Amino acid sequence: MSTRNISRVTRRRFVKQAGLALAAAPLISAPFVTQALADTKALSIVQWSHFVPEYDKWFDAFAKDWGDKNKLSVTVDHIPVGNIAARAAAEASAGAGHDIFGWNGSGGAHLYRKFLVDLTSLVDATEKKYGEISTIGRQIGYNQDDKTWSAFP
């Protein structure tokens, strides 16, 4: 009778291997935005359900009007603010998801930056036109180590 050394799947091991799998996932934002704009002429947005319901209604109408003017179908999904982190993890893990993700300052822009489009040129152009980004905006989207922006504040 042979004795095998079967390793137990511990929580620590599972999290480590899931993290490695997540690190190997392809870019999320760049390919899907390109595909959305090139193939389907559609744009999908996810953001937290605002505590003022009228804001969500206003934003949906704004997004629809913008889409109509730019010949794009725009859909906006509103989710509870407590579900933002889980949704981001699920979309990153699946390698598929929304084209634009509203982080609401939850740190996701830094956590998932390898999955996101570099927005440095957009932020630079905005700063030239409107002035310097605020301290809180910089904390939310600026990556100090490589001087890039992974979120638009």
Image: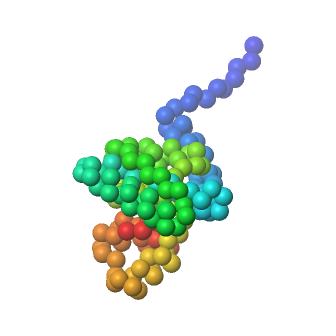
At a point 52% along the width and 47% down the height, the residue shown is 91
Q: Quadrant of the C terminus?
A: bottom left
One can see residue 92 in this view: no
Q: Nearer the viewer, residue 111 or 73?
A: 73
Left-right relation of 22 to 3? left
Q: Nearer the viewer, residue 72 or 17?
A: 72
- Color theme of the render: rainbow
One can see residue 121 in this view: yes
At a point 43% along the width and 48% down the height, the residue shown is 77
Left-right relation of 137 to 112? left
Q: Nearer the viewer, residue 78 or 104?
A: 78
Q: x and y percent of residue 127 in the render?
A: 39, 82
Q: Residue 86: which quarter of the image?
A: top left
Q: x and y percent of residue 146 in the render?
A: 50, 73
Q: x and y percent of residue 114 in the render?
A: 55, 60
Number of numbered discs present?
Answer: 0
Q: Nearer the viewer, residue 21 or 120?
A: 120
Name the outermost residue toward the top.
Answer: 1
Q: Quadrant of the N terminus?
A: top right
At a point 56% along the width and 30% down the height, the residue shown is 9
Q: As displayed, is residue 146 above or below residue 44?
A: below
Q: x and y percent of residue 17 in the render?
A: 58, 42
